[in-house]
Amino acid sequence: MSESSDSHLADDAQVQKLGYEQELQRNHNRWSLLGFAFIILNTWTGMSASLSLALPLGGPSVVLWGLLVSSIGNGCLALSMAEFASAYPIAAGQYYWVAILSNPEWASLLSWMCGWINVIGWVFLIGLANSFSAFMIGGIAAMMNPGYVPKDWHYFLVYLALIVPIFCINAFGNALLPLLNKTALVWSLLGFVVISITALACATPDFQTASFVFGGVINSTQWPTGLAWMIGLLQGTLSLVGYDAPSHLAEEIPNPSKNVPRTMVGSVIIGTFSGFLFCIALLFAIQDIDKVLTAPEGPVLHILSVATGSRGAAVALIIFPLFCLVLGTTAIMTTASRLVWAFARDGGLPLSPWLSQVQRRLGVPLNALISTLGVVVLYGLLFFAGQAALNALVGASVVSSLLSYAFPVAVNMAGGRKRLPKDRPFRMYELVAWVVNAIGVGFTLLTTVLFCLPPAGPAVGRQTFNYTVVAFGLVLVVALGDYLLDGKRRYKGPRIPVTNSK
């Protein structure tokens, strides 16, 4: 028997020890997992796609330094979750950890709420990433055809044209996903290098000043500048969320107790580094900040077209982040479907017996993928509800993700950090762990409040109100209502082994 087979048998035995049967194929390796995590975070691409969020809320300084602030908070959360993933490498992820770390009397309800928040956050992220792709394509069309103004239904059709092939790749191309993830890693790094060098080379010698790039402040809102800057952290935070993805693939990779923690933390580090350098290059290449803020084609396309002096060159360059977004959306759908499947396996969702089935021939949870696609298509209808509704889903995606990360960390702290096994592969020094945990939870609480504030200012109307709190509140109401009506009967929490319940 080969060493690889021995390793897989040991990994399968670990899944059984955690209370489940091995149902999915272990197709991924360390490099495909890194590509998978990196393309989901896709920080430099996320920064380019969401530049319009931060520039009016603090300007260049929040784009750069806000990313670093966000990387500290998210890095602490990633380190905190890495401890859980090394001890309990299971596709369920956060809600499993909450159940095993909570007092038994609260374990069922707390893990249920964490599971719902985590599932909704990932499904929202699919729609968010796909809508960014649709907007980018609309920007290309607007720039190449100055008289063209994209309509809501145009964006929706593009959105559908993108998400259906992404679903098909996930449903029928499971064996190809590891290769696709490795390709995505190379493509993303190549795009980062090509665009950064091209933007700087073509903008020479008409660069922005260093004081503008590293210290420029813009406040186009009614909020005080300091508060506006803090709300602008949304861009950097959005560009870093998703690092729990490797944990939801724990049953499809070898040696997950070591590979998952490494990849979670490593993806945040690589994402921050690449995103910071990319934004420096882009900001130095800006010629007229006022035109960048109002460009109908979007900030990045405008910066590149002015720097290169060619709309065609700008479109050629923007293909890099566009394809990254498509690959990232594919990986996000993979993660979301695995989480839906895992949560349904424990009875956490309506129609759980159907959602928890694995299509043996394809080797994927096909029903979970179909249901995920259905919700994402409904998400696309928000194109007809206006920009305020779409912005609400941006905030709700980030808030849901961060809360699902902080949930098990806070529960672990409440229990004095005494419930994790001492022999886990990844373990921080206890004092360091308390500081890291506290920073992660504090960052989550702060940003949850900030990202629910209306970005334009305290004076709000129908189109300027921040509907994040409405979207997220609706999720909580549905989750709690389902639990009280039927969930309490069908959901007893994850299948925690007796040996780990002490």
Image (cartoon, grey):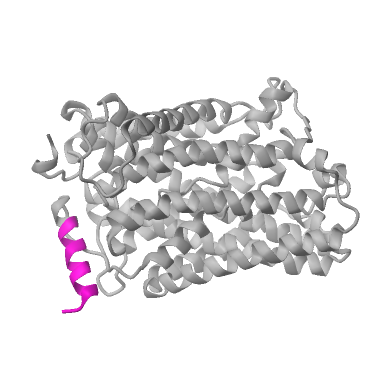
Residue in view at x 59 percent, y 59 percent:
159
Q: Would you identify the image quadrant in which residue 23 lies?
A: bottom left
Residue in view at x 83 percent, y 60 percent:
305
x, y percent for residue 155: 66, 56
Depicted 372 relative to depicted 95: above or below: below
Which of 497/385 is in front? 497
x, y percent for residue 424: 24, 46
Q: Which residues are magenta?
A: 1-14
**Can residue 487 be seen at all in this image of the molecule?**
no
Q: Quadrant of the C terminus?
A: top left
The overriding secondary structure of the stretch rendered in magenta is helix
Residue in view at x 72 percent, y 37 percent:
61
Q: Does the magenta portion include 2?
A: yes
Q: Is residue 143 left or right of residue 401?
A: right
Q: Does the magenta portion include 124?
A: no
Depicted 272 relative to depicted 435: above or below: below
